[in-house]
Image (cartoon, rainbow, N blue to C red):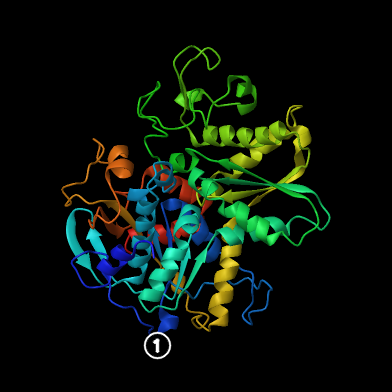
């Protein structure tokens, strides 16, 4: 299998943080938490959907009862923040390194270890292993889920590995009535788009349906990264264009800002949310996006422009948010769609209501059904969700090969995506509990605003309650 050497190295005893013995299957499996991982804080949208789910009653019938379905369950959440965004590994030809990161995420959840802080190499071993695993990241699901499943087999673990892609496709098809023509759009990271995972899954699921369902995709270059404050895509310290910028531009062949579409992008240029080098966007020969809202505006217009260029009038009915970060921007996506519906250029291409499909909701259902079928739920009334724990990765200051940005915020782009290779057998990162040292105020504010229940759990943990 791919990565056989890497897996054998980590399962035969060595000094790596990720080394693990055969997992086996514990008799106390019910008491174990559910593990969830993502490439950053975006996966918290999946955690939040699971944590707030109320689809079933205490008899497991599909009927809400006002009690959270997973209230009695503990969760372990990992954000591989140091190595995000995962999409860029595919663009840089480093799929093997991406899969290695995904396997390390899984090994962390299956293991007992974590680093006490980012300032010392001390390792604690009081983290429980898990009874089910959710890959919240679409790119990780598309490129690494089979390898994670194979890893679990090698370790002797029979846990279910649940990905978000199948869930999103099922959710999109559910809103299209029999006999109704419709377009389904996939808004995802460039790597997920390139994998064709959503297209292939949708085609498989709809193969027995007679109605015409068109599928289009838009790679959201920079949207995920801007939400996670990656400096190559968004930098509030700048008031003019900067050389390290990696997002859409006038000269990016795949993600080109088109000047004739500037009235439809309707970019917000206040407070340097767009960076340009002349007195206006129209006159400038360098334009850079510098806010989450403007990334949304660029990509939604680009998506709908595909429909226009295709000269097919099958209305856009649903957009699958194929990245866990994108639900943070769902309100802005809906606003832009409403604006475009009022224009002559795009209005005839959009259904009166375009549904935004969050795969997290169907993922919650799949997890519930698995725990129910396997009799793995804890007894009701325990409210163990308050015991959930949240971890993230940071660059390892004790690994001499690591190259960090001058401000210490993360790996340099060159080191992260070009210098490193798979099977180097180095611990590039430390995995530490969430803290204000490693999560920006902007990120916390987004979580607080959009995911208040999850924010309260994280806040409680960071304050030691």
Q: Residue at x 40, y 73 (%)?
A: 152
312 and 363: which is toward the camera: 312
Q: In the figure, 302 relative to 318: above or below?
A: above
Residue under the point 31% across and 66% down? 7
Which residue is under mark 1? 27
Instruction: Say which element carries label 1.
Output: loop
Residue 226 in percent (x, y) is at 45, 39
Q: Is residue 216 left or right of residue 314?
A: left
Against 375, residue 338 (above or below) is above
Q: Total number of numbered labels?
A: 1
Q: Residue furthest right?
A: 179
Q: Is residue 390 visible?
A: no
Residue drawn at the location 42% of the way across and 70% of the way down: 150
Left or right, 133 with respect to 351, comes to left
**What x and y, as percent, mark residue 252?**
48, 28
Q: Residue at x 66, y 35 (%)?
A: 306
Quadrant containing the N terminus is bottom left
**Can you give x and y, in whole percent of width and height, for residue 210 in the image?**
81, 57
> In this view, which residue lies farthest toward the front?
1
Q: Nearer the viewer, residue 33 or 399?
A: 399
- Closer to the camera in the image, 427 or 130: 427
């Amino acid at each position: 299998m791919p990565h056989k050497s890497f897996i054998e190295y980590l399962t035969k005893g060595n000094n790596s943080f990720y080394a693990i013995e055969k997992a086996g299957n514990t008799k106390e499996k019910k008491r174990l938490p559910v593990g969830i991982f993502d490439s950053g804080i975006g996966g918290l949208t999946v955690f939040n959907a699971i944590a707030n789910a109320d689809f079933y009653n205490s008899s497991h019938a599909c009927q809400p009862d006002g009690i959270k379905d997973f209230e009695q369950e503990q969760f372990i959440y990992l954000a591989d923040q140091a190595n995000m965004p995962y999409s860029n590994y595919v663009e840089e030809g480093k799929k093997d390194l991406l899969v290695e990161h995904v396997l390390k995420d899984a090994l962390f959840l299956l293991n007992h270890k974590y680093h006490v802080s980012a300032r010392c190499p001390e390792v604690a071993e009081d983290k429980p292993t898990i009874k089910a695993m959710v890959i919240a990241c679409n790119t990780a699901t598309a490129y690494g889920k089979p390898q994670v499943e194979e890893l679990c087999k090698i370790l002797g673990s029979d846990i279910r590995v649940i990905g978000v892609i199948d869930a999103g496709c099922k959710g999109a098809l559910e809103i299209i009535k029999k006999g109704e023509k419709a377009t389904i759009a996939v808004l995802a990271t460039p790597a997920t788009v390139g994998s064709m995972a959503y297209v292939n899954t949708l085609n498989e699921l709809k193969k027995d349906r007679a109605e015409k369902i068109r599928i289009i995709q838009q790679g959201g270059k920079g949207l995920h990264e801007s939400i996670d404050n990656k400096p190559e895509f968004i930098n509030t310290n700048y008031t003019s264009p900067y050389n390290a910028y990696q997002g859409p531009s006038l000269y990016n062949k795949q993600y080109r800002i088109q000047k004739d579409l500037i009235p439809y992008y309707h970019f917000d240029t206040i407070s340097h949310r767009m960076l340009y080098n002349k007195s206006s966007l129209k006159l400038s020969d360098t334009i850079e996006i510098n806010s989450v809202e403007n990334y949304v505006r660029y990509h939604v217009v680009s998506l709908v422009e595909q429909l226009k260029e295709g000269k097919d009038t099958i209305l856009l009915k649903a957009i699958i948010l194929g990245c866990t970060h994108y639900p943070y921007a769902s309100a802005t996506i809906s606003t832009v769609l409403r604006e475009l519906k009022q224009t002559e250029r795009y209005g005839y291409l959009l259904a009166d209501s375009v549904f935004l499909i969050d795969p997290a909701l169907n993922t919650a259902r799949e997890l519930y059904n698995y725990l129910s079928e396997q009799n793995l739920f804890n007894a009701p009334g325990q409210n163990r969700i308050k015991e959930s724990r949240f971890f993230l990765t940071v660059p390892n200051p004790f690994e001499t090969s690591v190259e960090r940005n001058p401000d210490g915020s993360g790996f340099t782009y060159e080191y992260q995506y070009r210098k490193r290779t798979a099977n180097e057998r180095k611990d590039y990162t430390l995995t530490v509990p969430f803290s204000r040292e490693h999560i920006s105020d902007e990120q916390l504010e987004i979580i607080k605003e959009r995911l208040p229940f999850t924010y309260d759990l994280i806040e409680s943990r960071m304050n030691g309650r």
